[in-house]
Image (tube, helix red, strand yellow):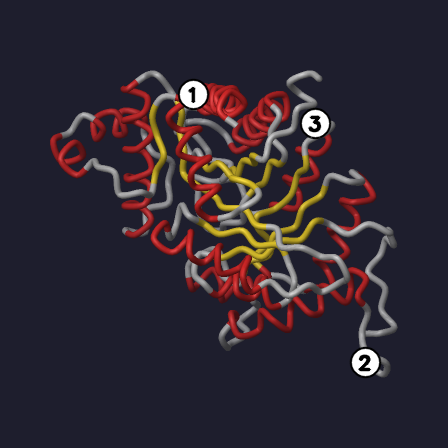
Amino acid sequence: MSVADDVLPLAVLDFVGIEHGESPSAAIAGAVSIAQAVEAAGYRRYWVSEHHNMTSLACSAPELLTAHVGAHTSRIRVGAAGIMLPNHAPFKVAETFRTLLAMYPGRIDLALGRAPGTDPLTAHVLRRGVAGDPGAEFPGQVGELLAFLGDGFPAGHPYAQLVAAPLVEERPELFVLGSSPYGPRFAAVNGLSAVFAHHMSPDLAVEALRAYRREFTARTDGATPYAAMSVLAFASDDEEAIGEFEAAWTLMIQNITRGIREPLRPDDIRAFARSPQFRAARGDDGRMVTGAPKSVAGRLLELKQEAQVDEIVVVTPNLDRDRRRDSFAALADAWRQLA
C-alpha cells in the first residue's frame, strides 16, 4: 500500500490565510498546494472555514473553494467546516452541495455551524437585515436542509413539492460544528456526526465529545456515533519555527479582539516571538499542541483516545506555508509510527 492510499484518521481545517503582501489569488493557490500536500501525506479530509469581513483570510465562499480544491485533488474528501447556516437558505445549501456531489462523487463533506462566523454588523448584512436570534433558528434550518437532501417533508408541507436539483442519490457527509456543549448535544439528539473546536474551547472539548458518544440517538437503523475534534497543532524540530507559530496565533487573536483584520507582518511575528512579554506568557495552557513531530503525534493520539473521537482535525494557521506543509507531512509520518 502506498503512502497516498494509507488514509489516516486525520483532517486539515484551513482558514485560507492571506500572507502579508500576497494577493488573494496567491493565497487560494497556496490553499490548493496545502490540500495536495495533505492528500499525498494520507490525510482523510481537507476542509475550509467560513469567515467574512477579514482582509487576512480568503474563505468567505467555502463552497467555491471546495469546488476549486476538488478539481485539483483526486482522492481526499473536501468540504466546508463549516457552512454557517444562519447566513444561508437551507434550500440553496442543498442545491450547492448536491452540485458538488455531482462534480466529485464520494468526496464531499458539509459541516454546519449555528454562529454567523463574523462580527454583528456583517452578520446583519448577510441575513439581509433580518432580526432575531440566528442560533434559535438553527434546529429548524437543519431540519429543512435534511428534508431537501432526501429526508422529505411531511404530507401537506408547502415545501414538499420542491426539488433541490440536481438530483443525486448520495448525500454529503454531514457534521455539526460546536465550540460549546450545544453542538455535540444537538448532533447526539439528532443522530448526526459531531466536530468540536478544541482550538476554541479546549477546556470543554473532551467532556463534550464523551457526552456526545454517550447520548447519541440513531436516526436510522444501524447508525453509530462519529466524532472529530479540531486541535491547534504544529510539528517541527525547529524551536524558532515553533515559537513563531505560537506567537502568530497569539497575535492573530489579539488583533481580532481589537478589530484588526489585516494580515500579520512576518517581522512583527518574529519580534513578538522574541519579546520578553511573549516568553513570559508562553506556557502549556492546553490550547496548542506543538513540538517535535513524535511528541505532537503522541499528544494528538492521547486526545483522540481521551475524547473518544474517530478523527483529529489539525488546525495550523501559520503564515509560512512551507512550514505548514512540512508540519503536516511530519505529523503524518510520526502518526504512522506511533499508531
SS assignment at label 1? helix
Relative to 203, is 283 on the left or the right? left
| Marks 2 and 1, how far apart at CA | 53 Å
Residue 183: numbered disc: none
Q: Earlier in the sequence, mark 2 or mark 3?
A: 3
Residue at x 33% of width, y 41% of height: 252
Residue at x 57% of width, y 43% of height: 310
Query: Observer-nearest residue: 312 or 125?
Result: 312
User: What's the residue type where badge 2 is placed?
Assistant: His
Q: Residue 292 location in percent, x, y?
A: 36, 21
Whether pointer 1 and pointer 3 mark residues with C-beta atoms closer than 8 Å, the reply is no
Q: Residue 123 location in percent, x, y?
A: 49, 63
SS assignment at label 2? loop
Residue named by callout 2? 157
Q: Residue 39 location in percent, x, y?
A: 63, 26
Q: Earlier in the sequence, mark 1 or mark 3?
A: 3
SS assignment at label 3? loop
Q: Earlier in the sequence, mark 2 or mark 1?
A: 2
Which numbered disc, 1 or 3, marks the residue closer to the eye?
1
Query: Observer-nearest residue: 271 or 234?
Result: 234
Residue named by callout 3? 72
Residue named by callout 1? 323
Q: Is residue 156 above or below residue 308?
A: below
